Every structure is written in C-alpha cells, then in structure tokens.
Image (tube, rainbow, N blue to C red):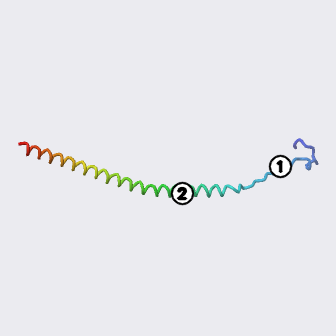
Amino acid sequence: MGDMPPGRDEDRPHHVSVVERSRGSGVVFALVALALILAIGFFYMTNERRGDRQADKVTEAAGSVDDAARVVGDAAKNAADTLRNGN
C-alpha cells in the first residue's frame, strides 16, 4: 500500500525526531524558587516592622491625647483663676 512501488523502501524519507531536554529549565526553576523564598522572607521582615510602626502610632496617638488633656486642664485652671481673681 502507499504511493511508492514495492522494493523502493530506501528512497523513502526517514523522519528522525530528536528530543533534547532544555538545559536552562533547571536553572529557571531554581531562580524562581529562590525569588519565591526571598519574597516570603521580605514579607516576614517587613511585617515585623509594620507591627512596630503600628505600635509607635498608637503610642504617639496616646501621647497626643495626653497632651490635649493637659492643655484643656491648663485652660480650665486659668479660667478658674481668672474667675476667682476677677470677683
């Protein structure tokens, strides 16, 4: 069967497939894994700093409330002194 007459097998083209494994695929995988590890490490390092910054902001806000209470207390004291001295 086929287009070629019998006995002419040597004239048929031979198809040879060569499959080579890419040498760079292991390197690419290693680089991607390394980048992932570094990204996770960076996340954890900055997350701790973020917690410190939040604690600093809370402390600063509490300090601001304390300062505002002192200002109000001083103003009330001054107003009371003024009323006492004025009468």
Q: Is residue 69 left or right of residue 2?
A: left
In three-dimensional space, the C-alpha distance between marks 1 and 2, rounded to whole angstroms, equals: 46 Å
| Residue drawn at 54 percent across, 57 percent down | 38
Picture coordinates of residue 84, whole percent (x, y):
8, 45
Q: Is residue 30 left or right of residue 80?
A: right
* Quadrant of the rendering where the N terminus is positioned: top right
Residue 35 vs 12, above or below: the answer is below
Q: Is residue 82 left or right of residue 42?
A: left
* Quadrant of the rendering where the C terminus is positioned: top left
- The residue where tag 2 is placed is 38
Nearest-to-viewer mark from 1 and 2: 2
Picture coordinates of residue 34, whole percent (x, y):
58, 58
Tell me the crowding category of disc 2: few under 14, some 14 to 19, or many 20 or more residues within 10 angstroms, Cα based: few
| Residue drawn at 87 percent across, 47 percent down | 13
Element on which disc 2 rests: helix
Kind of residue sitting beneath label 1:
His
| Residue drawn at 46 percent across, 58 percent down | 45
Q: Residue furthest left?
A: 87
- The residue where tag 1 is placed is 15
Q: Nearer the viewer, residue 52 or 47?
A: 52
Q: Earlier in the sequence, mark 1 or mark 2?
A: 1
Picture coordinates of residue 82, whole percent (x, y):
11, 44
Tell me the crowding category of disc 1: few under 14, some 14 to 19, or many 20 or more residues within 10 angstroms, Cα based: few
Which quadrant of the figure has residue 53?
bottom left
Kind of residue sitting beneath label 2:
Leu
| Residue drawn at 62 percent across, 58 percent down | 30
